[in-house]
Image (spheres, coloured by chain):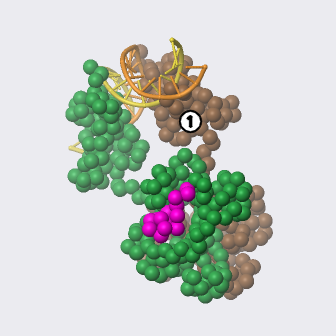
Chain colours: A green, B brown, C yellow, D orange
Amino acid sequence: MPENRQNGTPAYKKIQATILRRIESGRLKPGDAVESERELAKIHEVSLMTARHALSALEQEGVVQRRRGAGTFVAPPKIHFNKLMGFTELMAQRNLMANSKILLFSVVENEQDVAARLGCLNHARLTKVERLRLGSDEPFALETCYFSADEYPNLTRASLARDSLFSSLENDYGIQLAYADEEVDATAADSMTAHLLQVPRGHPLLRMRQVLYSTKGKAAVYVLGIYRSDRYNLMIRRFR
Amino acid sequence: MPENRQNGTPAYKKIQATILRRIESGRLKPGDAVESERELAKIHEVSLMTARHALSALEQEGVVQRRRGAGTFVAPPKIHFNKLMGFTELMAQRNLMANSKILLFSVVENEQDVAARLGCLNHARLTKVERLRLGSDEPFALETCYFSADEYPNLTRASLARDSLFSSLENDYGIQLAYADEEVDATAADSMTAHLLQVPRGHPLLRMRQVLYSTKGKAAVYVLGIYRSDRYNLMIRRFR
DNA sequence: AAGTGGTCTAGACCACGGC
DNA sequence: CCGTGGTCTAGACCACTTC
């Protein structure tokens, strides 16, 4: 009787959901055993292969670990390394109040290098926003971001003053950010930057240039960030 | 007749191997179609589920892409982001000759902060190696690395002068490196560093502190690196 | 309409782990 | 020893893409 998908949700996803629910609610903790394939098959009235599919896929996602001959166990909580976060999220993670001061908001047409990085035409109209980024009212960084003025016409000065760029893109525009490529180096504070970030001239600063890509693989935003390295430093995990 | 695994290699792995071989040899290029599940099942005389397993797992690894209703296609070549590389490998990638000058090689017992990062006892005996790193005879970086003097007694000055630290660990000691956690910030060159790296005093430099972990999850080496940011900069990909 | 991947069944044998 | 995950069969129906 191959009639298990009552509504359209695959059976294996339903099985996963019952497990995920118990993990998220804390009823299952890391190291705890999950039902075996055979148990799940009986409980949900599916075949072994289907129960197996549910567990294998969960293992792939890093939710559980499977040990032959032993069983399936809840994996230690996933730690997100190299996670792409906006300034607001970054500050929230450290329990600091994120704040911004918009120094410049304009449309430019002659930033060819930026346009190239975004994959736009050379003379595309780009919105350029320069912001001083504060954490608990202390200067952290100077961020200049660029995005297509034609594709995001509603990203106005007012909307940016209210919401973070990330949440504006993701909520208002339905743009899901997927990843960012970053280039990191060190630079010295020029007099303008020094004044804004309240450091001596020539002070070493962390410079990051990032191109943010949407889930469709399209370059959406270019950000040039200059960070006070005493207040912010990068944490990265690299793999062999 | 459930007797397909002639030698002990699972059938699905054999199927994967035939596909991988064709990709690596160039007979299959990105975008090319791979046999369908049903074709593979017939060719290799296995059931659909087994052929399917082979393709699904390859998709998970990013080797192929599957499109419902269309077929299975060779994925664009995997680009390794955030890849952990030693200085020697880094230079090789840029077609530069890697060279080193060992400035110091000694055993220390009182670097408690380093010992803590390596998960050793506070007064563990650590081998400390300071090296000036050159690429095509131009100074690139100053690297100081630490590892347990007791666990790696054969990592001598001579062996380091001959081979890279990475290859010594991996080939001579059977230590497979898995990942590294890095902390990156900017700093100014003190007079000693300035002299060695041939930059003005106070020049901004990229500073990286990394803890290298083996596949067993054990911290193996701690490295403090100071890089000339005009000659080297970090490229990172972060994910949402 | 033909072919593809996605889901699923109801069993089977094997290799391994812990008791 | 028994229970676990790992591999596998010989089919099936569905949803989707391509033509």
Quickly name the residue at label 1.
Answer: B64
Q: Which residue is drawn at 48% across and 36% down?
A: B57
In the figure, A76 relative to A48: above or below? below
Q: What stretch is highlighted in magenta?
A: A152-165
Tell which residue pokes out farthest to the right in this image. Answer: B137
Secondary-structure class at tag 1: strand
Quarter that holds the N terminus of chain A:
top left
Residue A37 picture quarter: top left
Question: Along the horizontal axis of the image, is A7 left or right of A176?
Answer: left
Residue A197 lies within the magenta run: no
Front-most of residues A106 and A78: A106
Q: Position of A231 compared to A13: left or right?
A: right
Q: How crowded is mark 1: few (under 14 residues within 10 Å), some or many (20 or more)?
A: many
Q: Quadrant of residue B128?
A: bottom right
Q: Say which quadrant the C terminus of chain A sits in.
A: bottom right
Q: What residue type is labelled 1?
A: Val
Q: What's the chain of the residue with tag 1?
A: B
Q: Residue at x 59, y 65 (%)?
A: A145
Percent x, y for residue A11?
A: 31, 33
Relative to A95, does residue C13 appear above or below in the rendering?
above
Q: In this view of the protein, can residue B100 be seen by the observer? A: no
**Residue occupying the point 45% across, 26% down:** B50
What is the x, y in percent for residue A51? Answer: 31, 33
Q: Please count the marks in the image.
A: 1
Q: Is residue A134 visible?
A: yes
Q: Residue at x 44, y 20 (%)?
A: B47
Residue A171: x and y in percent read 43, 55
> Where A227 falls versus D17 (above or below)?
below
Residue A154 included in the magenta stretch of the image? yes
Q: Tell me if A121 is positioned left or right of A5 in this view.
A: right
A16 or B80: which is nearer to us? A16
Q: In the image, residue A10 lies at what x, y percent?
A: 34, 33
